[in-house]
Amino acid sequence: MEDKRVVKKPDYVFVVKEENLPNIQLYLDNLKSLGLKFENEKGITIDYIFIKLFMPNEALSHFSEIYDIGSDDLIVSPGFYMRPPFNTPFKNPIEEQFPYSPECLKQIRKIQFNYLTDKFFRKLTDAQKIQITFKILENTKYGEKYKEFGITKLINLKYIETAYPLHDGPTTDTGTNSRSLLNRYWSNLSVIHMRQPLDLIYQYFGSEVAFYFAWLEYFNIMLIIPAVLGSLTFILSSLYLLYADPDQVREVCENSEVLCPTCEEMKGCRFKKISKSCSLAQWTFVFDNNITLAYAIIISLWATLFMIFWRRKENELKFRWKCVEDVRETEIRQAHLEKATRRRLNPITGEIESYTPKFQTFYFYTITCAACAIMFTILFVLVLVNMTLKISFMRFCDVSSSSYLRSNSFFLAIALESIFTVTIVKSFKLIYGVVSLKLTEIENPRTQYEFDNSVLYKRYLLAFMNNYMPTLYIAIFKGKFMTLPHEMTFLRKDTCQPCGCSVSLVAVLSFLMTIKTLLGNVFSALKPSVKRICRFCLGLTRDKWDPSLKIPQWEEEYYLEPLRRFSVTEEFSEMVIRYGFITFYSKAFPLAALCALLNNLIELRSDANKFVKTHRRQVPIGKSGIGAWNGILRSLSYLSTAINMYVIAFTSDFVAREVYRYNNGNGSLSGWINSTLAKYATKDYKAYDRIENKAQFCYFRGYYYPPESSHRYTISQTYWMNLTFRLITMFTFEHVIFLCISVFAFCIPYTPELVQKQIDLPRHNEIQKRIIECEAELSKKIKSEFSLSESLHGIKD
């Protein structure tokens, strides 16, 4: 089993207990018969056997043809390695190459391509070598029975503790291996301003990881425009508030009327003047004005252009990396074979195959739908709990003897609401990843492609509800159930202030876009170190930090965190959720794009550090683009337009202000705040008799006829007029945006013209070749017939 003459880096490593070696002997013998070679090494810091696996070039060549992995052409054109015509701080030195000597350039080029030199071999990257090796390991039998095959099952049976491919080498070696280059010029925060070496990432980690980081880089570049515009929107709105003294703000700050309290049954409750909401009115104006309206429309158009130009970028990368055709893992999953006990004849292949009956599949999908419904119900209940907590805390502050709590009750309540929301989101995130995986295992999809997509959709659906449910409640439902004070139930007391609900939405969004992301990055960075320290403190390993011990690379990497198969899906889901926050609530929170850009710049390098330094090398997964995420992003772009228009029409007071301005005659908003408040006679509610500073009238946000009217306390005509214009505004803006989207999609093709020509070139050359061959055959045939005709004439003569 051992071949001590082999000195190159292992292609794969098995970690096995010595007593389990006989259990995998047949498996190793079968691998050896396929041309693989092995070495055994005893662990220095842990009592395991490390079996190093080596793939000879001949075996790689053979299996690359079988699995159709690799390319007969160069992946990257030679121009990629040419010196650029100008210097820029955003160029990556790996792309530029000129900081190195010619000898070093030659070595780097060799490392980056790492192609086999024999002319009859396919060109293989490091990632493709690992792909081939893993496919061999996954399809090799370890027993005599039909279902006894695969490295994954051996790990599940605990015959093998773990198995992993090795990184190229240590990260400390400057420029001598791909990993050190990526560590220095990709995962380092000092190069946060530089472009990513995408081709080297593709060659080292494979297409799934490369497309994720390519999309993330594109996302960051595209975020620059909305981040700058959003910052300008915030600055201009603040300056306008500072120097223009808007009517709606001044009316709140100078209003001597009182609000109807929501703590009437509690001792110490008091009527609070509307002027106490002055600072709240100022913040509301900053995030709800005509400038933010223009910004929201721009973002709706930006979302469309984002998708169109990404598809162009994606198609360009597909061509560059030779994965234009859709890559799908169509092999039947081993888990499917084990659970699917029935067999049938495949009408296409003519082979006997395992299958799951339709009624059983329907039953499994019913379980999935029921589980998702339960998860949604739990989230909905948590939103109600959050609402109850906020109302209770605000009522407590309103009756407190502390003047600070009474004056700042609303701000303190929304801060508590935002913190509780972040806690819910972070806690639920720990659950839905496991739930989506377990539910998919119950469904038992036939192929790995179907399995991956099923996990992706469930994970994103649960993440969508987890992240957006609290904000959608504020944007769509909060304050819409307001009624007369004597008809108020407890949950209806979660009302909007005289100036609206915009600040509540801004507060929750700002916490989700900053605190939640910051906590995620901190936990992600500390998790590997904490696990290593805990493992050492529990005595599970010897002191591997002893300088006298020379730890080989395969044992060093045993202590790194393993990367799960759906690690990229998890990271992608977080980024797409962030994209949704930017596009859904651009009207309410223009600074969302800036927060996302700053977080993304840090998270990109943090994720890169995870892939390069703190985690084991992942088995590459072949993907042709970002796959199902394109459909999700396209759906989000359409949904964001609808939500944005709803926020403009209903959550903000834009429509109501413009209707009032038009009806006012002089074009001013003088008296507008009072028009949004309904008058209520305190004598009509006995609970108000216990309040010390009782006033004759109080006001609440709503459109009702006053107590002196013959239609007292019924919904006023103003409400119906505003509702009509809100609906007209929403549908008009929505259709205009959708028209622009259709025009953009029609005018800008998804595939760049140059790329399309290069894709069509091989087919064009093949047609030309066939035409030339046909013309040659026809010419030869004509000459032959002419020669035969001449011969016949000769005979006649």
Image (cartoon, rainbow, N blue to C red):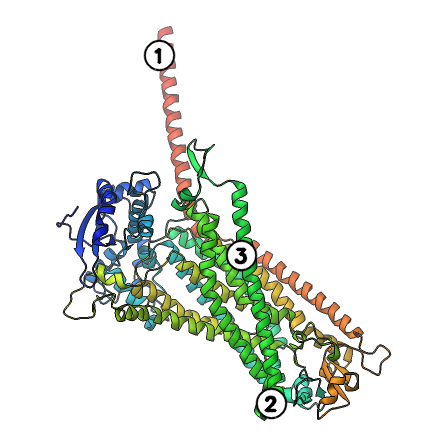
The residue depicted at 45 percent of the width and 44 percent of the height is 446
Q: Which mark is residue 150?
A: none
**Are the residues at dot 2 and dot 3 in contact (C-beta closer than 8 Å)?**
no
Q: Report x, y in % for residue 273.
A: 68, 89
Q: Which residue is mark 2?
A: 400
Question: Relative to 253, is 365 on the left or the right?
Answer: left
Q: Which mark is residue 371?
A: 3
Question: Relative to 536, is 495 on the left or the right?
Answer: right
Q: Earlier in the sequence, mark 2 or mark 3?
A: 3
Camera-side residue: 130 or 81?
130
Q: Report x, y in % for residue 195.
A: 37, 66
Camera-side residue: 15 or 174?
15
Q: Looking at the picture, which amino acid does disc 1 mark? A: Ser
Question: SS class of the residue under badge 3?
Answer: helix
Q: Report x, y in % for residue 686.
A: 76, 85
Q: Which mark is residue 791?
A: 1
Q: Quadrant of residue 107?
A: bottom left
Q: Looking at the picture, which amino acid does disc 2 mark? A: Ser
Question: SS class of the residue under badge 2?
Answer: loop
